[in-house]
Structure formats: C-alpha cells, structure tokens
Image (tube, helix red, strand yellow):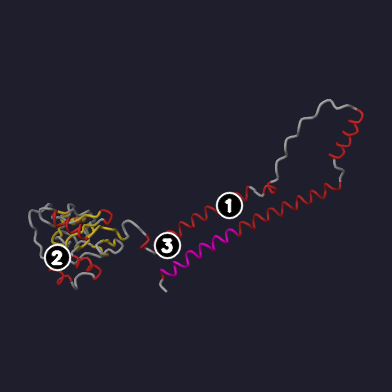
C-alpha cells in the first residue's frame, strides 16, 4: 500500500473521529448543565412545598371579599413570565457549542478537501494539473500556417514542432516521458527562462526563442544556443488521446544540458535580442 493510499484512508477517518469526539464532549457538557439546574429547581420546589403558598392565601381572600363586595372592574392581565431556557431546550451555552461545532466541521472539511487534492493531483485543475491544449491536427496546422509555436496560456507553455529526423539523437538525451509528444511531432516548452525566470518570447525572424532579460537564446525545440542560461528550456510531458492533446504541467522536466543540439537548427534571420 502506497503512502498516498494510506493518507487517502487515514485523513477521512481522522476527520470523522475528531467530529464524533467533539460532538460527544459538547453534548456531555450540555447534559451536565441541565442536570445541575434540575437539581436546583427540585430543591427550590421542595422548600416551597413546606411553606404556605401566598397565591392561595390571596385567592382565598379575594373570594371572601367578592362575596361581600361587588366587583367594579377587572384587573389588567399580568405580563407573561419569561420562559425557562430548559423548557425551550435551548441555552446560550448550547448555542455557542453548536456554533463552535459548525466552525470546526467546516474547517476540518476544508483541510480534508485540500489534503485529498494534494494526494490526488488528477483532481486538481489549472497550472500544476493536466491542461487541455486542443487537437493535434489543429495545433500542427497553426504552427505550419504561422511559422510560429502554438501558445497555451493555461499551461504557460509553447507547443513547438519536434522534427521526426531528430528522434534518433533525442533517444538517450531526453527523459522517456517526453517521447509521446516527440513521436507525435510536438514538444511543450515551459515559457520561463531557466536563467532568472523571465518569460521567453518567440522571435519570428530568427525562428528561435530569445530571452529579453539577459539574451539567452534557444533553438526551436528549446535547446540552449547562447547566453547565460544554465541549460535548455524546461518542458512538460504531453499526452495524446485520439486527437486530444493535454500538457501535464505537474511534471516539469529540466531542459537539456548545454551543448545538446538534436535538431542542428541555425538562426533563420536576424535575432530579436
Ligand atoms: S532571465 Fe533569461 S537570460 Fe536571464
């Protein structure tokens, strides 16, 4: 069993146990308050039963008075007595406990969701997950028609053409995860310069990528050809299902070492930088 599977099982179990423990504790506390109050009430009732009830005395006096004196007008009705919180079944403390329980449950649910998303990257969306780039045929048509790589903003990547004749040299140089894309004729290059992190634009005249910050230059497949960068452009594996292309931005593969030049592409015009 992998660590991820153990976490997937353990996190929901721990959350449920924590909620059960919290509910049990808060209920016990409520019950204690109610039983304490009940004892006081009982004691008060018991002591009241030993003395003469003032209300009875008053009622008896009124009855006697009404027999001798005609009633002129009735007394105004007494205001209703406030209801005992126990009778209502609801105290300020129980309200507070329920509020705390609700906040605790929401916080634990958020934590569990974030943990699951971390353990299960496939459930995530946006940069860091697999990003749909479109149909392979459409991407290749765009590249050919515009003589430029296809930009996928959500993946922060350029999809550039990878020539079939370079595949032989690429074997043994590049990570195996990149070959689904290479064999389909594409490579997904991370737009960020491996030198100091500037965004690397495409230079239409030289047909290379050229960094405006310190002048690093990369050929069409992101192999370093000049400037201070420590390696070629980083890249992502590409998955092709039928015609649909997706870029796995969760797996960033460092660019090739300085000196790797599998395509032999020279600049095709003036440099932009
Ligand atoms: S950041 Fe690109 S060359 Fe320095």
Question: Residue 28's spot in the image, x, y percent?
Answer: 64, 58
Q: Main secondary structure of the magenta part?
A: helix
- Please tell me whether mark 3 sits on a helix, a strand or a loop: helix
Q: Are marks 2 and 3 in contact (CB under 8 Å)?
A: no
Q: CA distance from mark 2 to mark 3?
A: 40 Å
Mark 3 surroundings: few (<14), some (14-19) or many (≥20) residues within 10 A: some
Tag 2 secondary structure? loop
Is residue 10 highlighted in magenta?
A: yes
Residue at 79 percent of width and 30 percent of height: 75
Q: Quadrant of residue 208?
A: bottom left
Q: Quadrant of ligand 1?
A: bottom left
Residue at 42%, 69% (x, y): give it.
Answer: 5
**Place of residue 218 in the rendered image (x, y in percent of width and height, measured from the top left):** 15, 60
- Tag 1 and tag 2, C-beta contact below 8 Å: no
Callout in the foreground (2, 3): 2
Residue contact at pointers 3 and 1, CB within 8 angstroms: no
The residue that disc 1 covers is 98
Q: CA distance from mark 3 to mark 1?
A: 27 Å
Where residue 248 appears, as percent x and y from the top left, is 29, 62
In the rendered structure, which disc, 2 or 3, sits on the residue that comes first in sequence?
3
Pinpoint residue 190: horizontal percent, then vertical percent.
23, 59
Circle 3 sits on which residue? 116
Q: Residue furthest top?
A: 72
Identity of the residue furthest to the front in this view: 242
For marks 1 and 2, give the CA distance.
65 Å
Q: Which residues are magenta?
A: 4-23
Residue ID for mark 2: 163
In the rendered image, which quarter contains the N terminus? bottom left
């Amino acid at each position: 069993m992998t660590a991820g599977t153990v976490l997937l099982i353990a996190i929901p179990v721990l959350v449920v146990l924590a909620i059960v423990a919290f509910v049990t504790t808060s209920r016990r506390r409520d019950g204690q308050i109610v039983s304490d109050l009940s004892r006081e009430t009982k004691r008060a009732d018991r002591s009241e039963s030993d003395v003469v009830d003032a209300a009875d005395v008053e009622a008896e006096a009124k009855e006697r008075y009404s027999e001798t004196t005609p009633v002129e007008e009735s007394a105004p009705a007494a205001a209703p007595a406030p209801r005992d919180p126990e009778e209502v079944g609801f105290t300020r403390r129980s309200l507070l406990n329920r509020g705390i329980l609700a906040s605790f449950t929401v916080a634990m649910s958020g934590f569990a969701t974030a943990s699951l998303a971390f353990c299960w990257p496939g459930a995530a969306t946006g940069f860091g997950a697999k990003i749909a780039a479109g149909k392979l045929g459409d991407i290749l048509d765009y590249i050919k028609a515009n003589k430029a790589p296809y930009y996928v903003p959500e993946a922060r990547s350029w999809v550039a053409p990878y020539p079939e004749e370079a595949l032989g040299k690429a074997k043994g140089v590049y990570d195996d995860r990149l070959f689904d894309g290479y064999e389909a004729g594409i490579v997904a290059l991370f737009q960020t310069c491996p030198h100091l992190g500037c965004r690397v634009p495409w230079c239409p005249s030289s047909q290379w990528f050229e960094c405006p910050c310190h002048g690093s230059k990369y050929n069409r497949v992101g192999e370093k050809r000049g400037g201070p960068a420590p390696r070629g452009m980083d890249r992502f594996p590409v998955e092709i299902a039928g015609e649909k292309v997706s870029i796995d931005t969760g797996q960033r593969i460092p660019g090739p070492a300085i000196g790797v030049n599998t395509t032999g592409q020279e600049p095709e015009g003036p440099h932009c930088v």
